[in-house]
Structures are given as C-alpha cells and as structure tokens.
Image: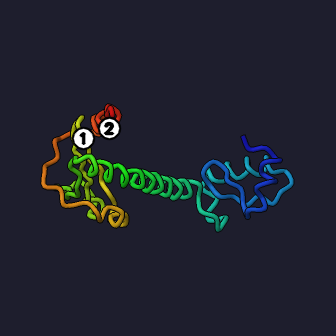
Amino acid sequence: MFTAKVLEEMQGQGGFWVQGEAVYIPSEHAIASVEIYRNNLAKGKIGIISNLPTMDAYKAVSANEAKNLAYSERNKLLVPLCKMAIALNLVAGIGQHQGEEWDDDWRNIIFLELPTGQISFHIHDSELHLFQFLPPYTGKWDGHDTATKWDRLLDLDF
C-alpha cells in the first residue's frame, strides 16, 4: 500500500513507482496526487511524465538478470558435478541441441550419464568456457523431461 510516508521516502529517487508506472509527485498531498494521476492516466491525459523506466520494464530487466544469475550459479555447480562424474568413470560431455525450438546461443548441452539415468542441461554460449574440459558427447538424448532429470539427480545414492 502506498502511503504518504512511503511516497515521501521514494521521492529522492526522482519519482514514485505507482502500479507499474514511474510518477513524479511534487505535492505534499501525495495520496491525492496518486489518485489524480490514476484518473488522468485512465482518461488518456498523461504522456511521458518521468525519465524513470516503467515498473513493467524494470521487472522485465530484473527478471532477466535474476534468470541469468540463476543459470550462472547452476552452471558453477554443474562444473564440479561433471568433474566428479568423470572421476567416477561416468560419461559426461558436450552435445548440440538439434531442432529449431532453441535460440542459437543456447544450443550447447551438457550430458551426464548417471547410474540413475541420463541428465542434460542447456548452456549459454557465454558460459561454455567453464566446460572446456569436457569431451564431445557421442550419445543421444534419451527424451527425459525436466522433472525426470531432477528425479534422476536426486535419486543418486553414494
């Protein structure tokens, strides 16, 4: 809930985030200003009123950055998993995705053949250097889905 206090604290950032829009509210009566803004927006009377990005754009950028960070962290865990697999004489390697449903920079696939079954992970081109120690994968994808992949990994028993 936007209160006058919350809006006042946000003013130092050059504008207020109000339901997905960047708004500059100079009034001491911030809540009334928000209501006026909402009414004018609904009537189509407001154009560009701030140089801040919209909340939707901010959310999209933040979500993409969060997704990239999650993949990067996953890949950093995948590197030692691949090294352990090789040390245990299990098959690990890099293959290429066949088909049209992936972006070109996401076609690299890390395959591991575990005692519980094959698992695979798509790797972005920018992180391929982390896996330069792996040989080419000569097998084929066994058709597993994401849930099966994680079940196979979690079912490992040493």
For disc 1, the neighbor class at 10 Å (few under 14, some 14 to 19, many from 20) is some
Horizontal and vertical percent position of residue 62: 53, 56
- Taking the spot 26% from the left edge, 51% from the top edge, the residue there is 86
- Taking the spot 78% from the left edge, 59% from the top edge, the residue there is 11
Residue type highlighted by circle 2: Leu
Residue sitting nearer the eye, 132 or 19: 132
Residue sitting nearer the eye, 17 or 78: 78
- Residue 132 is left or right of residue 2, and the answer is left
What residue did someone put label 2 on?
Answer: 153
- Protein image colouring: rainbow
Horizontal and vertical percent position of residue 81: 35, 49
Which type of secondary structure does the marked residue at label 1 adopt? strand
Horizontal and vertical percent position of residue 15: 72, 60
- Residue 48 is left or right of residue 128, and the answer is right
For this orientation, the residue located farthest to the right is 28
For disc 2, the neighbor class at 10 Å (few under 14, some 14 to 19, many from 20) is some
- Taking the spot 77% from the left edge, 51% from the top edge, the residue there is 7
User: Label 2, label 1: how many angstroms apart (C-alpha)?
Assistant: 8 Å
Q: Quadrant of residue 150?
A: top left
Label 2 or label 1, whichever comes before in sequence order: 1
Which type of secondary structure does the marked residue at label 2 adopt? helix
Residue type highlighted by circle 1: Leu
- Taking the spot 83% from the left edge, 57% from the top edge, the residue there is 27
Quadrant placement of the C terminus = top left
Residue sitting nearer the eye, 106 or 82: 82
Q: Quadrant of residue 147?
A: top left
- Marks 2 and 1 close (CB-CB < 8 Å): yes
Residue sitting nearer the eye, 81 or 8: 81
Residue 114 circle label: 1
Horizontal and vertical percent position of residue 1: 72, 40
